[in-house]
Image (tube, helix red, strand yellow):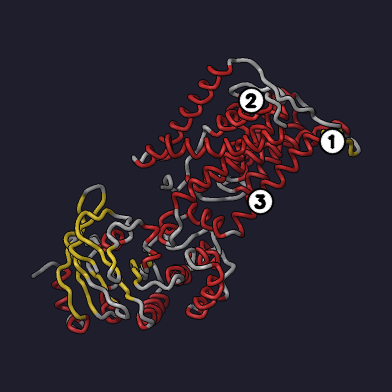
Amino acid sequence: MSVFISALGFGVVTAAILAISAVGFTLQFSVTNVFNLAFGSVMTLSGFVAYWLNQVGVDIWLAMLAAAICGGLISVAINELLYEPFIRHGVNLFGMVIITISVGLIFDHGLQAVVGPSFFSYNAPAGKALHFADFVLTRQELAIIAIAAALTAVVQGALQYTRLGKAMRGLAVNPALARACGVPTRSVIALAWFVSGALAGIGGVALFLDISTFTATTGSEFLIVIIAAAVLGGVGSPRGAVLGALVVGVVTEVGGAYWNPQLKDVLAFSVMIVVLLVRPQGLFAQLANERAVAR
Amino acid sequence: MLDGVSAGYGGHEIVHNVSIEITPGRIDCVVGPNGAGKSTLLRAITRDAELLAGRIWLQGTEISQTPGNRLVSRGLAWVPQLDDVFNTLTVRENLELGGFLLPRRRVAARIEEMLELFPLLSRLTARVAGRLSGGERKLLAIARALMPSPSALLLDEPTAGLSPEMTNLVLRDQIPRLSESGVAVLLVEQRAIEAIEISARVHVMVSGAVRTSREAQELRGDWDELTRLFLGEE
């Protein structure tokens, strides 16, 4: 029982990191229909911004905030400078995927050329371990869970109840009609990229804190699990992404603890495939595949 | 309002040199066979097709170069033939987005006005638009377009795919009432006879050009003449 409970604790932490990132990934996708595989690179880049700040003595939580802003700006810049020209030329969904992969690789290898192939870690103590029966979590892990819960609730609430959130959801399903209603579509798309990048930044720092050592490609390696969580939840649905993150996070950690930690990813994708066999549209359906890239 | 408009897609001209003037409180209908360019004409006004030549005016202001998302603030509303609602949003949220440019405190009151105008929608406010019937959906689309109190309304085949009862409700009941309230309506319609019955002026479009523009009265009852025009005979 205690193995199960402590693995569950790890699972919830992994789920928290996955949830932050998967919500960012899926929010931007639902609005723009660009399946942005450079998302992991934005996580890494922002994670390194936090690392450099942390090295000069900035507290890691403050550095996380800076990483969020940087991630948001990088994300907007990638869209405006690199993706937009292709979208304007009418490149289709599949073409855009190839372009985002290329951008991700350029960023990862560019960063590696700068920082080298070594391992890095933040200067941030994990804090006192807190025991709840067999459940052991450090203060740092608790903080990550709290941040994930707060961020996903804020994003979901904003989408559901604010005028801008509704405009974003409207733009996601019918860009032409959103324009006809007077929604400034370009600004709303830019905002979606910013929020997505900011969540990538926070997710990146949380991930690097959790796994304690990281390299210039760690974000991209983790991306595939984020996509599993997003797809499991139904791509385009932030609520689904949170649920997908919980399933993937808990199943991989609990399964890994009982079976073989090396097979965590095998478990994650097996779960995803089984769920998609039963519910091809994901846990929360949203028809995104019929749409073209939003402009 | 439309002055010598030519329009199309990717530089390919589909609509040639069309001039139509619409007036508040009047319905103008554009009828014509399939593929005549009727929808492209409307899409040129809304910036969804390319305006290749000509100018478009609305209440004395030229809107030929106005970006699509600024047209609504100039008083132009548009109900497309397909994809006319936000499928995943509720009826109320659709109306709220229709009023995106209204001052926040006006929105709720305006939604109530719309629900009074379209009582069928009032018990459906919490329903997701994608789950409405064809007729309910079209009424929502029209209500959404009316939210900002436009001065001109473009309707692209509002009865396409509707049941006969719903066609009646939309075409004979709702649209004439809108025009009576002072909105200038430009109606593109496949059901030519029904459209002509409710319109003041008729523009017959064939092969991308307006063949003739006449008072609807002149054409009513003279369906042979209409058939001749549809077939492109002079």
Task: Determine if residue B160 is in view.
Answer: no
Disc on res. A154? 3
Q: On the image, numbered disc 1 is attached to which residue? A: A5
Residue at 47% across, 35% down: A78
Q: Nearer the viewer, residue B165 or A75?
A: A75
**Three-letter amino acid code of the residue under disc 2:** Trp
A100 is higher (above) or lower (below) than A20 = above
Image mark 1: chain? A
Which amino acid type is shown beneath numbered disc 3?
Val
Q: Is residue B179 above or below residue B10?
A: below
Most extreme residue toward the top, as rendered? A117
In the displayed structure, A137 sits above or below B167; it is: above
Left or right: A226 as drawn, with respect to B213:
right
Q: Residues within 10 Å of mark 3 (few under 14, many from 20)?
A: few
Name the residue nearer the viewer: B77 or A232: B77
Q: Residue at x 61, y 29 (%)?
A: A49
Q: Earlier in the sequence, mark 3 or mark 2?
A: 2
